Amino acid sequence: MGSSFTPNDDTIAAIATPPGDGGIAVIRISGPESLNIISAIFETGGEEAPGFLPRTLYHGHIIHPENGLRIDEVLAVYMKSPASYTGEDVVEIHSHGGHIVPKKIIDLVFARGARPANPGEFSLRAFLNGKMDLAQAEAVADVVNAQTEDALKQAELQLEGVLSHKIREIKDIILDVLAEVEAQVDFPEEDIDPIVKSALIGRTQDILTGLEALSDTYREGRILKYGVSTAIIGKPNVGKSSLLNRLVMKERAIVSPVPGTTRDFIEESIDVRGLPLRLVDTAGIRATGDEIERAGVDFAKKKAGEAELIIAVIDGSAPLDEEDYEVLSSLEGKQAVLAVNKADAGLKVSDGGLRGFCAPERIVYTSAREGTGIEDLKEAINRLLRGKEGRGEAGEIVLTELRHKLAIEKAAESLSSFLKLLDVGESPEFLALDLRVALDSLGEITGEVTTEDVLGRIFSKFCVGK
């Protein structure tokens, strides 16, 4: 790692709460000068700063040290190194919120020698000081940005170290295999004992199975972290906007019996069985002479092409027409569910006529007007996105970072190479090399093996104050 990521002696500070109106703001300070800074600008009842026992909340005022003017009534707490979030001396000032008060306090802190923290620098220092590994540090941002309960649970599991523990268990097994292989280095002229060789193959294959299963969870983890862009498409007046309103549980889109009412697009985020969906309600797809509506139709087709998931809507109370077939034909090769809407008005569309366009388990009969079939639609989406397997248990970890998936795939590739070399009787030195590459690859996940560039990319995505 480069020197810029080596723990140093400077002190950093930032406002750790979002800007704008709010009851409370938190100003966080970390570094060797933290206690000196708070002692210089804090007083209790007109007296000088208290002794600041660690982990004790003090009530008092922030004062300007030069003119003695009181800036705000606050609470302050000191956390002594190494028993703090960053592993350094840390002070937190809990002031009134808003725009002016927190800024005046942070300006005072900077004037006393602290510098502005970079995005994610508090968590970076926690990692560098051994308070958490890299996978746990990444989870800090995921906790803040979680959009659903399931996403939050996964972030909390990773923050607790569940993924790191699993990686360490796998590495321990690889180390045992490596020890067996290196024990043969002193006897290069002899083949590995058949019983030992069989045990090494079995253990390595078990590791590969576990790595493959963990890698396969990335599909679900990516959805939990980033959400799924979802387009609602259909010809005009089939109930797309009504369906959107039912899904978001509020009157978000204008509903009208007049075809072509929706000309622009409407975006909303929803939680479907713990999965975050970014819904886009688009203009009805049809041939039209209206220039503005035609632009909306073209945009609807573009959004459908870009979407990761399509909810296609047809009017089940009327026979299929050319416009319906155009919508249905656009589902080919896409992740899609089909909502046969207006099912309460008497069906004139059969499963048989739809199965050529959509699998039976993805066809759902709904009535946006009556609110029926909405839960079935959500369940169909859930099954489609999570896959048939899903997670066996609620506490099972899934991969949410592409970086983790690539590291696991690299480790698996090295272990597969190890098995091939072992099978042809390659020398122990070459066998050990593949095992060490696998260990290093897994070490990238927890940060045991990392580079300055990797750390820079990871922590630059954090908000200031974390």
Image (cartoon, rainbow, N blue to C red):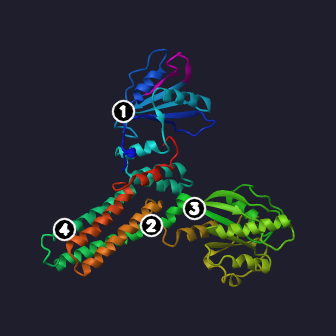
User: Is the Cβ of the residue at disc 4 closer than 8 Å to that at disc 1?
Assistant: no
For mark 1, what is the residue?
80
In the displayed structure image, the side of residue 330 where residue 346 appears, left or right: right
Between discs 4 and 3, the one toward the N terminus: 4
Between the C-alphas of marks 2 and 3, the distance is 16 Å
Q: Which residue is mark 2?
A: 392
Which one is in front in this view, the residue at disc 3 or the one at disc 1? 1
Q: The disc labelled 1 sits on which kind of residue?
A: Lys
Element carrying mark 1: loop
Mark 4: amino acid: Glu
Q: Which residue is mark 3?
A: 273
103, above or below 443, in the image: above
Q: Secondary structure at mark 2?
A: loop
Q: Residues within 10 Å of mark 4 (few under 14, many from 20)?
A: some
Residue 81 % position (x, y): 35, 35
- Label 3 residue SS: loop
Q: Which residues are magenta?
A: 57-72
Q: Please tell me which of labels 4 and 1 falls first in the chain.
A: 1
Residue at 20% x, 75% y is 427
